[in-house]
């Protein structure tokens, strides 16, 4: 459906994300795990791309991409102080490191293509608190290396690797705690998540589109139902971030999150509001994913019909992801769509845009669209 | 399941007892000023989104005293493939929803939101509207742009393109 994004477009999109607040919520209460046993899941997705030219004139391009990720919290026990006194993180993540480029030897340019496939598995111990949730321990690390499609090195056995990942919650209520990765040590792609989102240097360009977010919920009710709802969210989130999204991609994600929220509400754990906790809604991890996906869509406005743009705006608002910046950019996109509709005398579309502009507070766009509509008879 | 999880239908029944169906003023384009009927009844009145569009008849919520999590409801529209609801708060878009049903609570939980559970809440001075779309995604009918506030309101008007005033 879409071609690869241009570097400039990606850079602009990411620049927009960089100015977003870390959390969209109006957080005023303490952020901590309410006492009890919790489960959770971490969402790990995206790519890290670098490209450049070496001093000798040879070039390289490297793409690291998460290919599979299953990171689950088990039996995370929080005491009355909100301290995590026990818990495990089950990890099974895979990624590829794909390198292409040229080398120069004896005055001739030689292309190359090397691909490393990595997988880390194991169990990490969890301690800390919602503000600083630490997962530490040893993972098994397997690597295979291919050159031009042929396996050139297969690691015999597995190599142990010590890692420590620190997550920090940005929101908490009695049914959900959510946040993101803030520190990572040890050999793992996880550390790359924390690198700058864009780097431009004389001989290097780097684009970091990796995300690692988590959400946790009380271990109550039917664990299988919650697990399935989380899996639906994960699948939909991966789909939404896999290139510029379709309207259906975004709606699937929003609906999956609503289904998860519904199951969490059914747990009925919030009958007695916990002291010190302020109900939150913005689901910053969801908003983060949605904003990323919508920003990618707005880089390619011409690929969407005006009706699709309006549907994307609606879905983004439904997911609480449309901040001032995205609101303005949707207004600009609808303005372009209105110009085209006026040129094509597409009255239905002008009416659709006028209606959306009226409902979303786009004053000038509303006036322009209304003025472009034909006079009603009589 | 807790007794607190009251079905929407029950909430809606209570809401409809409190407000009667609105009588719609004539559409103008673009609309200016409050509805001439605004002071005549407690039913929700607003300004038309667009001249000439068939009307989506709104059943609730009332424009004030709607509670923090109001239930939005309207009459079905012939030829509608889906409905699209948008709530605009004083600080920008607050919530939106799309679906085939003709009622939905803010946040889309099908039962009363448990206390302490996060979710969107109506801010004073909000505006909302619902439109009907055909299978091609074009607007075929629209409600007025209606005010809604959680508690008693001194009366704000909702102007399309601007929001609550």
Image (cartoon, coloured by chain):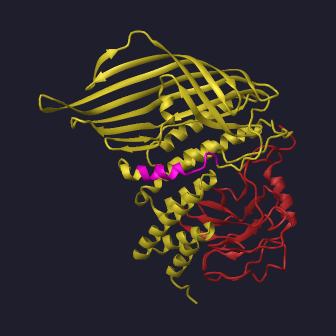
Of helix, strand and loop, which mostly describes the magenta segment? Answer: helix
Chain B tint in image: red
Q: Furthest-bottom residue in view?
A: A378
The image shows residue A276, relative to residue B28, as above or below, that is above
**Could you say which is closer to the camera, residue A331 or residue B83?**
A331
In this orientation, does residue B136 appear?
no
Magenta part of the protein: which range?
Answer: A10-23
Q: Is residue A213 left or right of residue A33?
A: left
| Chain coloured yellow here | A
Q: Is residue A21 magenta?
A: yes
Q: Is residue B101 left or right of residue A368?
A: right
The image shows residue A178, relative to residue A69, as above or below, that is below
Residue placed at 51% from the left, 39% from the top? A238
Q: Is residue A366 magenta?
A: no
Residue placed at 33% from the left, 21% from the top? A145
The image shows residue B59, relative to residue A186, as above or below, that is below
Q: Furthest-top residue in view?
A: A157
Q: Is residue B1 left or right of residue A93?
A: right
Q: Is residue A304 left or right of residue A371?
A: left
Task: Give how far across and how far down residue A235 sits, in percent.
Answer: 54, 37
Task: Give how far across and how far down residue B25 sits, in percent.
Answer: 72, 81
Task: Give how far across and how far down residue B97 sits, in percent.
Answer: 65, 56
In this orientation, does residue A238 appear?
yes
């Amino acid at each position: 459906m879409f071609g690869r994004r241009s570097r400039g477009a990606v850079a602009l999109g990411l620049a927009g994300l960089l100015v977003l607040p870390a959390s969209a919520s109006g957080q005023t209460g303490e952020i901590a795990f309410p006492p009890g046993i919790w489960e959770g899941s971490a969402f790990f997705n995206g790519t890290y791309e670098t490209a450049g030219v070496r001093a000798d004139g040879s070039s390289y391009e490297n793409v690291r991409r998460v290919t599979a990720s299953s990171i689950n919290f088990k039996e995370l026990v929080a005491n009355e102080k909100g301290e995590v006194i026990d818990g495990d993180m089950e990890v099974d993540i895979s990624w590829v490191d794909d390198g292409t480029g040229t080398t120069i030897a004896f005055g001739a340019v030689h292309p190359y293509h090397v691909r490393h496939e990595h997988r880390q598995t194991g169990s990490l111990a969890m301690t800390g608190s919602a503000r600083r949730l630490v997962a530490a321990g040893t993972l098994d690390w397997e690597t295979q290396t291919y050159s031009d499609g042929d396996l050139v090195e297969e690691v015999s056995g597995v190599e142990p690797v010590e890692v420590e990942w620190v997550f920090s919650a940005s929101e908490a209520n009695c049914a959900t705690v959510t946040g993101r990765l803030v520190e990572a040590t040890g050999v793992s792609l996880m550390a790359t998540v924390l690198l700058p989102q864009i780097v431009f240097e004389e001989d290097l360009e780097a684009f970091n589109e990796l995300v690692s977010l988590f959400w946790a919920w009380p271990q109550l009710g039917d664990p299988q139902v919650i697990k399935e709802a989380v899996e639906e969210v994960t699948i939909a989130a991966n789909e939404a971030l896999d290139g510029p999204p379709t309207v259906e991609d975004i709606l699937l994600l929003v609906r999956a999150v609503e289904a998860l929220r519904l199951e969490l509400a059914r747990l009925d754990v919030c009958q007695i509001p916990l002291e010190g906790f302020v109900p939150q809604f913005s689901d910053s991890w969801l908003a983060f994913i949605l904003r990323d996906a919508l920003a990618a869509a707005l880089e390619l406005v011409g690929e969407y019909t005006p009706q699709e743009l309006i549907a994307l705006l609606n879905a983004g608002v439904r997911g609480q992801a449309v901040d001032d910046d995205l609101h303005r950019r949707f207004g600009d996109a609808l303005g372009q769509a209105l110009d085209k509709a006026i040129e094509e005398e597409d009255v239905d579309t002008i009416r659709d845009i006028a209606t959306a502009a009226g409902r979303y507070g786009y004053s000038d766009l509303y006036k322009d669209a209304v003025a472009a509509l034909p006079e009603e008879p009589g | 399941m807790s007794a607190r999880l009251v079905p929407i239908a029950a909430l809606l029944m209570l809401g409809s007892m409190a407000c009667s169906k609105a009588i719609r003023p004539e559409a103008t384009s673009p609309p200016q000023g409050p509805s001439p009927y605004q002071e005549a009844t407690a039913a929700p009145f607003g300004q038309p989104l667009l001249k000439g569009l068939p009307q989506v008849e709104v059943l609730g919520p009332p424009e004030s005293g709607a509670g923090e999590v109001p239930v939005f409801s309207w009459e079905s529209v012939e030829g509608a493939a889906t409905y699209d609801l948008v709530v605009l708060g004083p600080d920008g878009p607050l919530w939106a929803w799309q679906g085939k049903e003709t009622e939905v609570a803010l946040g889309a939980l099908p039962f009363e939101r448990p206390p302490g559970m996060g979710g969107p809440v109506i801010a004073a001075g909000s505006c909302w509207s619902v439109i009907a779309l055909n299978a091609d995604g074009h607007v075929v009918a629209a409600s007025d742009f209606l005010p809604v506030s959680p508690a008693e309101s001194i009366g704000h008007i909702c102007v399309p393109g601007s929001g609550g005033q």
